[in-house]
């Protein structure tokens, strides 16, 4: 699904990511840990193609195609989707219209919103005056409507209260088409979509999301380098015990 080869990224003349190599297979969910400022958002922003991130070395392949120099909308069309850590406000555009744009008429806006108890926000401007948790729900509703093959999630649980975390966790599982509690992805009518293998790359600070998402592989990004790979839960326990600096020196 995704292959990142020797990727080096510069922001405003400063090297932020160095020699990143990463491979995500269809059906896999990977988790990215790392301290503030280590370059996690930069990596996701580079994968989706924000032009402030300059790729000075390396290549990004998505479903076998070199997308290193494609624009954001071309990547989105091919099936890449991003949940922003800090999503922008868009004045003059309602959530309802935005969700319609994301879904390209493939589904019902009210139904997408209902998954995140978001119906009462539909006639508000995109993200305008939303709280931290509401921003994350807004992002997830848009992603559910877009239905990307590779979902990039930048701290989906940050700012979300304990009660809403389960809601967010279920929406993420729906995006990844895994562990649906209501079994609805097993309906014969949806067979075609069910056979489609999704993948995810999730940044988490708190680790809460590990309680809801079946993560396959964890990585630690430290000072712009991917330093450590292993079982996500074991990695997270190691980080909690030893801190990032020590953790990247141990092999999990
Ligand atoms: P994370 O998401 O891991 O907290 P970011 O990817 O947001 O980290 O940022 C990585 C580093 O890039 C930070 O040290 C940040 O200050 C730096 N950075 C971001 N934008 C710029 C910029 N315009 N000029 C220089 N450094 C920047
Ligand atoms: Mg970040």
Image (spheres, rainbow, N blue to C red):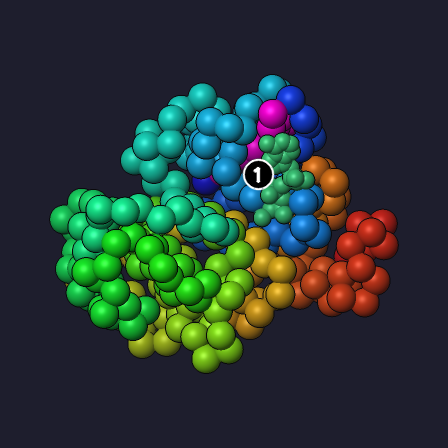
Q: Residue at x 38, y 32 (%)?
A: 72
Could you say where residue 168 lies in the image, as x and y percent from the top left?
A: 42, 68
**Quarter that holds the C terminus:** bottom right
Q: Residue at x 78, y 54 (%)?
A: 244
Give the extent of the magenta segment. Answer: 2-12
Viewer-side residue, 63 vs 222: 222
Q: Which quarter of the picture shows residue 40?
A: top right
Q: Is mark 1 within 8 Å of ligand 1?
A: yes
Viewer-side residue, 50 vs 251: 50
Could you say where residue 190 lies in the image, as x and y percent from the top left?
A: 21, 60
Q: Which residue is drawn at 30% across and 35% down?
A: 77
Q: In this view, does 87 lie to the left or right of 127?
A: right
Residue that mark 1 sits on: 42
Q: Is residue 202 left or right of residue 224?
A: left
Viewer-side residue, 231 vs 71: 71
Q: Is residue 133 left or right of residue 93?
A: right
Viewer-side residue, 70 vs 52: 52
Could you say where residue 153 lies in the image, as x and y percent from the top left?
A: 48, 52
């Amino acid at each position: 699904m995704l292959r990142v080869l020797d990727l080096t990224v510069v922001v405003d003349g400063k090297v932020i990511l160095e020699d990143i190599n990463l491979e995500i297979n269809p059906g896999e969910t990977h988790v990215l840990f790392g301290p503030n400022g280590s370059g996690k958002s930069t990596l996701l922003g580079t994968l989706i193609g924000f032009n402030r991130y300059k790729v000075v070395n390396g290549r990004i392949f998505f479903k076998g195609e070199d997308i290193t120099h494609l624009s954001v909308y071309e990547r989105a069309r091919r099936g890449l989707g991003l949940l922003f850590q800090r999503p922008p406000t868009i004045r003059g555009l309602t959530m309802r219209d935005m969700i319609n744009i994301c879904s390209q008429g493939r589904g019902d806006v009210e139904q997408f919103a209902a998954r995140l108890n978001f119906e009462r926000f539909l006639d508000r401007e995109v993200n305008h005056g939303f709280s931290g948790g509401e921003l994350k729900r807004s992002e997830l509703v848009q992603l559910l409507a877009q239905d990307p093959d590779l979902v990039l999630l930048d701290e989906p649980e940050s700012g979300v209260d304990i009660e809403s975390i389960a809601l967010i966790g279920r929406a993420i599982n729906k995006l990844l088409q895994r562990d649906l509690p209501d079994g609805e992805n097993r309906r014969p009518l949806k067979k075609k979509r069910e056979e489609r293998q999704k993948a995810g790359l999730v940044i988490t600070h708190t680790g809460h999301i590990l309680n809801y998402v079946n993560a396959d592989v964890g990585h630690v990004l430290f000072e712009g380098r991917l330093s450590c790979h292993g079982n996500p839960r074991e990695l997270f326990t190691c980080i909690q015990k030893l801190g990032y600096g020590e953790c990247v020196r141990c092999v999990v």
